[in-house]
Image (tube, rainbow, N blue to C red):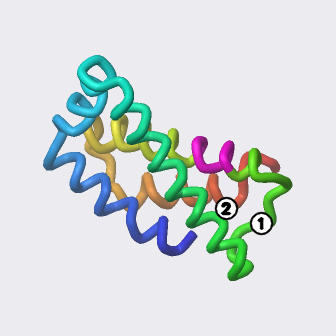
Amino acid sequence: MTARAARWPPSFQFVRSHRQVYRIIDEAEFVDPEGFRRHYETTAQRIAARLDAGRAKGEVAASESKLATEVEAWAIMGMNVFLGLRFGVWGKEKPAEVSRVANRLLREGLEP
């Protein structure tokens, strides 16, 4: 979690400086559908590997299955994509505050 928390503010700052990155990736779906899919699949694989590494260190809760790890990876990637779009491309909120809220959600979930 700490490594992800450290990466979010710079990611938002990168997106704010390179807003066209979302348009380029979205347009790739029509120009190179296989490359578009490969982009997301390999990103999810990297996130899953980080989750597994965190599990090996006792930093991330155990996963119930390989499918569960894949679902978690895709969900985290979705957070990254849409938080970057909303708060990096469209927003002016402080990246550290957005990161704090997102990281709390990953750590604690939605349970009361």
* Residue 19 x %, y %: 18, 39
Residue at the image position 48 percent from the left and 73 percent from the top: 3
Q: Nearer the viewer, residue 106 or 98?
A: 106
Q: Is residue 43 above or below residue 53?
A: above
Q: Give the mark toward the camera: 1 or 2.
A: 1
39 relative to 4 in the view: left or right: left
> Which numbered circle lies on residue 107?
2
Q: Earlier in the sequence, mark 1 or mark 2?
A: 1
Q: Secondary structure at mark 2?
A: helix
The outermost residue toward the bottom is 57
Task: Specify whether residue 69 is painted magenta.
Answer: no
What span is in magenta?
70-75
Q: Residue 1 appears at what percent x and percent y?
A: 57, 69
**Label 2, residues with CA under 10 Å away: few <14, some 14-19, many ≥20:** few
Residue 2, image x and y in percent?
A: 53, 74
Q: Which mark is residue 61?
A: 1
Amino acid on which disc 1 is placed: Ala
**Which image quadrant is residue 28 in?**
top left
Q: Quadrant of residue 86?
A: top left
Return the residue found at the far top.
30
**Which residue type does callout 2 highlight?**
Arg
- Horizontally, residue 17 falls left or right of residue 8, namely left
Decide which of 77, 97 is in the foreground and name it: 77
Q: Is residue 101 visible?
A: no
For mark 1, give the secondary structure.
loop
